[in-house]
Image: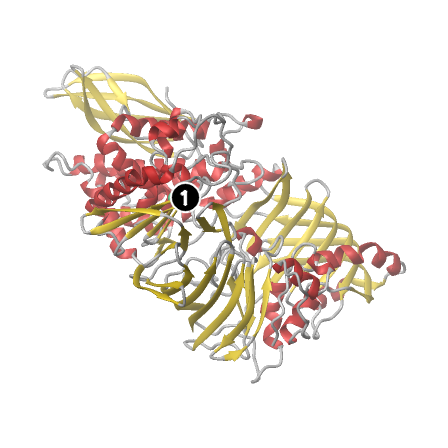
Amino acid sequence: MTNVTVRAGKFAWLTLVLGCLALATGAQQAVPAKPPGPAESLYLKLRSVDLDPGKVFKIREATLDRAAVHISLDDGVIAFTESIGGHITGAFFQGEGEVLLSPPNTMERSSLALFTGGAILEERFSTAYFRFNDDVYAELTPFLRGPDDESEAFLSRWKETAQDLSDQDALRLLLTLGDGLAGDEKVSPANTNDHMLHAMLQGNKLGAFDVWYDTLMKEQIAAGQRKMVAGQSYYDLWISFAVPGPRVVSEEGEGAGAAPNFDFEITNFKIQTEIKPAKDMQSKAVLSVVARKDCRRTLVFELSRLLKVQQVLADGAPVEFIHNQAIEGSQLARRGNDVVAIVLWSPLRADQKIELSFEYSGSVLSEAATGLLYVGDRGTWYPNRGLAMASFDLEFRYPAAWTLVATGHKTEQKEEGGEQVSSWVSDRPVPVVGFNLGRYSQSVTYAGKIPVLTYATASLERGFPRTSSPSGPEIPFIAPGQSIAALAVPRSVQPPSPSENMRMVGATSARAVEFYERYFGPFPYSELAITQMPGAVSQGWPGLIFLSSFAFLNPEQQGRTGMDRNRLAMAEQVVAHETAHQWWGDLVGWSSYRDQWMMEALANYSSLMLLESHDPAKFRQIMQAYRDDLIAKKAKGMALADAGPVTLGLRLSSSQFPEAYDAICYGRGTWIIHMLRTMMRDGDRKSLPGRPKGAPDELFVQILRKLRTDYQGKTVSTQELMAAFEAQLPRSLWYEGHKSLAWFYDSWVGGSAVPGYDLRGLKFTDKANSTLVAGTITQDHAPHDLVTSVPLYASVAGKSIFLGRVFAEGDETQFRISAPLGARKILLDPEQTLLARSR
Ligand SMILES: [Zn+2]
């Protein structure tokens, strides 16, 4: 075992462990180095492995096939890496090669085309560095044509590059090879279907890019590229998809892009933290872990790189750990979280329970303003494994005069040795916990019996409001690398005081709680705390909202920030939006990155329904602003909508469209929920003509309430959301006679179009009691297979009368519909329920 921390940063491999330590902790004094343990030794070798001078060969007409990935090495030289514990894990190739990868669906083909200009990845490359955990060496041996005559020149040219690139997959390789380390018992690999190939290619046209095949991922195949634009670094994920075919991936298994070994569950966290303002904390976190199936010896957790782990115990016995900076270019780096890997003495077997105890400390806090602390951007302050439901037991020690607010409810507050000690327990399993510390003023208001406690400081953070422009209401739990536009505020403006407006914020949130309780059922937690957070982002955590200082400004003060009226109208909804996350996002979670949009869309739409209830004009203004943002032309004649569908999640924010995540997951997502709501309303009024007026959203609300009941404490996928609506689908929304929303999913959820509609060739035939209307609906700015349920109205004597909904498919759809006798004017979607271009 060891307590030496290692970073796998871009440059860290150059330095030795001691140097890294100083980097990681900013420590003034060198910490005495202990020899690394077996797992760390293995890890260090994996991340700086050399090419083997004895294994440089000519190679011809070789191929590597991994499901849809086809790589050919036509003619060139290949050098394999030195064997580590009997395993060859890498190879560097120079010569003529080609990669061929064909995405399985339209969404991925469009995504690929957006970045590469082609719907198929077909690229010749001149060099490649491969990293793998299986026997690629044996696979390529038949194609080796004897040793290369100029191997020395080859090695001296590529040695350093190969070594440079080798840190990227070291942790992933450790997961596989760590099981082979000698432990207390004879170990057999937990997972026989464990294959990984990462190709880092220098394309002739596309430049440097990556291709992955990794069976531990839910989406096993991916390709993408790191790109710098305007000083910002992006990772453009061109494609990512699951291998089509019979291989069944466990639904509760690994999330796409998530840390790969999610074969275990953490049922309970007991975290004791001592906080030393302004920056330091010292923590001990005890995790109750249960294996869902046979696991590996190496378990990976997220933990801020700003923290230093002192010790990890498994059932009381010290185990080796490797605390890692984000691993550049790897699947983990895409999620932007820092990780700590621990290596058990033997792998966990299915249903086995173990208690892991982590001791760590560091400067994870920032003091943003006098008396305002918060957990910084790299805020994974306890070892976690993504957003999974667990119960939490938190204890904090902190100096007098500070107020600490945490998720859960406070069970104890006392003084001990001149310090304050407070204990907090989660009311029910929650996906994430946090805290905030300040010299706050506080106010309390009630939403029914639920106390809403608001905490704010007298001053705004340094730099406000320069960094405070909510372009979207907030950034969700895991922030995408989005830029925040600076605001133009005259320097002469007196900075407003958050604590003055604290009551306003509390009252707004309490009103929202009461509104949502009527729609979605009881507030899930025993109380709601709202604390001020510096910067533009807000986050709604279970029972605790971190609210941007901006939201503590009153409307008049917000008006002075220079935002246009649409941004202001959106910004005003932030408190209600974050409050809605208590139901959507906290109580009901999302399954994978492809489903995250739902929680933003549902929370946002909930806040807009509240707005609509008292200010329908502003509701329409915001909806139109979302639509206009989506279709406004940007660079190269493209609009934000072209970045792709909501189901691409954080992938949307790329070097091409840095702001697309907000525009699409909030804007388009909100429209998708609006379309579902109005479809249910119209469908319902056709099938239940006798339904009492005044409850037009009965069916929609019923479906959401059931979604809450069915999925509270769990995660929900986009398909499950569709199924919830399908179960109650009114007959008029059955496309081609099927009780299914497949058409809606394909066209609107998995599509990116914002179409335009028109009516042509209307003919009116008066019958005995009604007028028969025939005509054509045209659909443009849309793919040919786009299907839309279009509401039609007749305008009779100045009144709009709903006639029914017609499925429009493709460019032109003919329809016949019955209207009140004498009708001569037909309106297409006059209430603007479709995400459509205005005519
Ligand atoms: Zn949100």
User: Image point 40% across, 60% down: which residue?
Assistant: 388
Q: Residue furthest bottom?
A: 185
Residue 649: x percent and y percent? 46, 45
Q: Is residue 728 visible?
A: no
The colour scheme applied to this rendered structure is secondary structure
Residue type highlighted by circle 1: Ser
Q: Provide the residue designation for mark 1.
A: 538
Total of numbered circles in the picture?
A: 1
Q: Is residue 605 above or below residue 247?
A: above
User: Image point 39% across, 54% down: which residue?
Assistant: 401
Q: Is residue 486 above or below residue 398?
A: above
Q: Residue furthest front?
A: 418
Camera-nearest residue between 117 and 265: 265
Camera-nearest residue between 346 and 397: 397
Q: Residue furthest right?
A: 149
Residue 773: x percent and y percent? 23, 21
